[in-house]
Amino acid sequence: MGYLLPSLRLCNYYCFLFSCCCFFLIMNPTTGTGAGQPSELVSSICKNTTNYRFCVESLYSDPRTPTADSYVLAYVSFDLAYLNASHTEDYIDMLLNNTTADCDSRLLQRLQRCSSFYGGAISALSQAVNDLDSETYSKLARLAGVAVHEACDCEAIFQGHSPFTLSRMNHDLRGLSKICVVISHLFTVSV
Ligand SMILES: *[C@@H]1O[C@H](CO)[C@@H](O)[C@H](O)[C@H]1NC(C)=O
Ligand SMILES: *[C@@H]1O[C@H](CO)[C@@H](O)[C@H](O)[C@H]1NC(C)=O
Ligand SMILES: *[C@@H]1O[C@H](CO)[C@@H](O)[C@H](O)[C@H]1NC(C)=O
Ligand SMILES: *[C@@H]1O[C@H](CO)[C@@H](O)[C@H](O)[C@H]1NC(C)=O
C-alpha cells in the first residue's frame, strides 16, 4: 500500500505536467515548437515593441533565436528586416512592370516613389549589417529608424489606398525595423 501511493502520485505528477504542456501548446501554437516560451532576452525586447506577439513570432522564425545573445539577435532582426525589404522591393518592381503610364499614371508614380523608398530602406539595413560585422554600434538605431520611416512613407503616399498586399508588407517592414531599433538601443546604452 505504502508502495502504491507514491507511484500513483508520480503518475498524477506526470499527468499534470502533460496537461500543462498541452495547455501551452494550444495557447501558443506558433511558438509551441522547441522551447515553447520565448527566452528572457527576447521577451524583454519584445515587451518594448508595440506588438509583442509579432515581435516574438518574427524573431523565432529564425533558428538562431532560441540560443541567441543580444549580438546574435541584432543580426537576426536586421537580417529579417533586410530580407523583408528586399522581397517587398521585388514585389513593387513586379507591380511596376505590370503598370503602364497610359493606364494608370498616378499608380505608376506612387509605385516608383515606393521603389525608391525601399531602395533607401535596403541600403540603410545593409549598412547596419556591415556595421554589425565591424562591431560599430553607434549608427544602428538611426539606420533602423530610416527603414521604419521609408516603410511609413510608402504607405502614406497612397493615402489609405495602397494595394492590400503592399500595405501588409509596409506594415511588416515597419514592425521588423522597430524591433531593430529596440535591439540597437541595447548596444548604445551598454557600450
Ligand atoms: C525597455 O525599455 C526600458 C524603458 O525605456 C529600458 O529601461 C529597458 O532597458 C528596455 N529593455 C530592452 C530589453 O530593450
Ligand atoms: C516579412 O516579415 C513578416 C513578419 O516576420 C512575415 O510574416 C512576412 O512573410 C515577411 N514577408 C516577406 C515578403 O518576406
Ligand atoms: C516585366 O514584364 C516583361 C513583359 O511583360 C517580362 O518579360 C519581364 O520578365 C518582366 N520583368 C520582371 C522583373 O517581372
Ligand atoms: C504581373 O504580370 C505577370 C505576367 O506579365 C503575371 O504573371 C502576374 O500575376 C502579374 N502580377 C500582378 C500582381 O498583377
Image (tube, grey):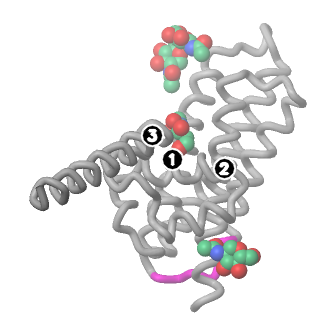
Image position, residue 157 (x, y; %): 86, 35
44 shown above or below 123: below
Nearer mark to the viewer, of 1 and 3: 3
Nearer mark to the viewer, of 3 and 2: 3
Identify the residue under disc 1: 57
Write down the region rendered in magenta.
Answer: 135-141
Q: Does the residue labelled 3 lie within 8 Å of ligand 2?
A: no
**Res 30 label:** 3
Q: Is mark 1 within 8 Å of ligand 2?
A: yes
Name the secondary structure under disc 3.
loop
Q: Count the labels in the image.
A: 3
* Cβ atoms at labels 1 and 3 below 8 Å apart: yes
Identify the residue under disc 2: 175
Q: Residue at x 73, y 22 (%)?
A: 163
CA separation in Å, label 1 and label 3: 7 Å
CA separation in Å, label 1 and label 2: 12 Å
Kind of residue indicated by mark 1: Glu
Q: Is mark 2 within 8 Å of ligand 2?
A: yes
53 shown above or below 110: below
Image position, residue 119 (x, y; %): 63, 48
Name the secondary structure under disc 2.
helix
**Residue 87, can we see it?**
no
**Res 158 label:** none
Kind of residue indicated by mark 2: Gly
Q: Is the magenta stretch mostly helix, strand or loop?
A: loop
Mark closer to the chain start, 3 or 2: 3
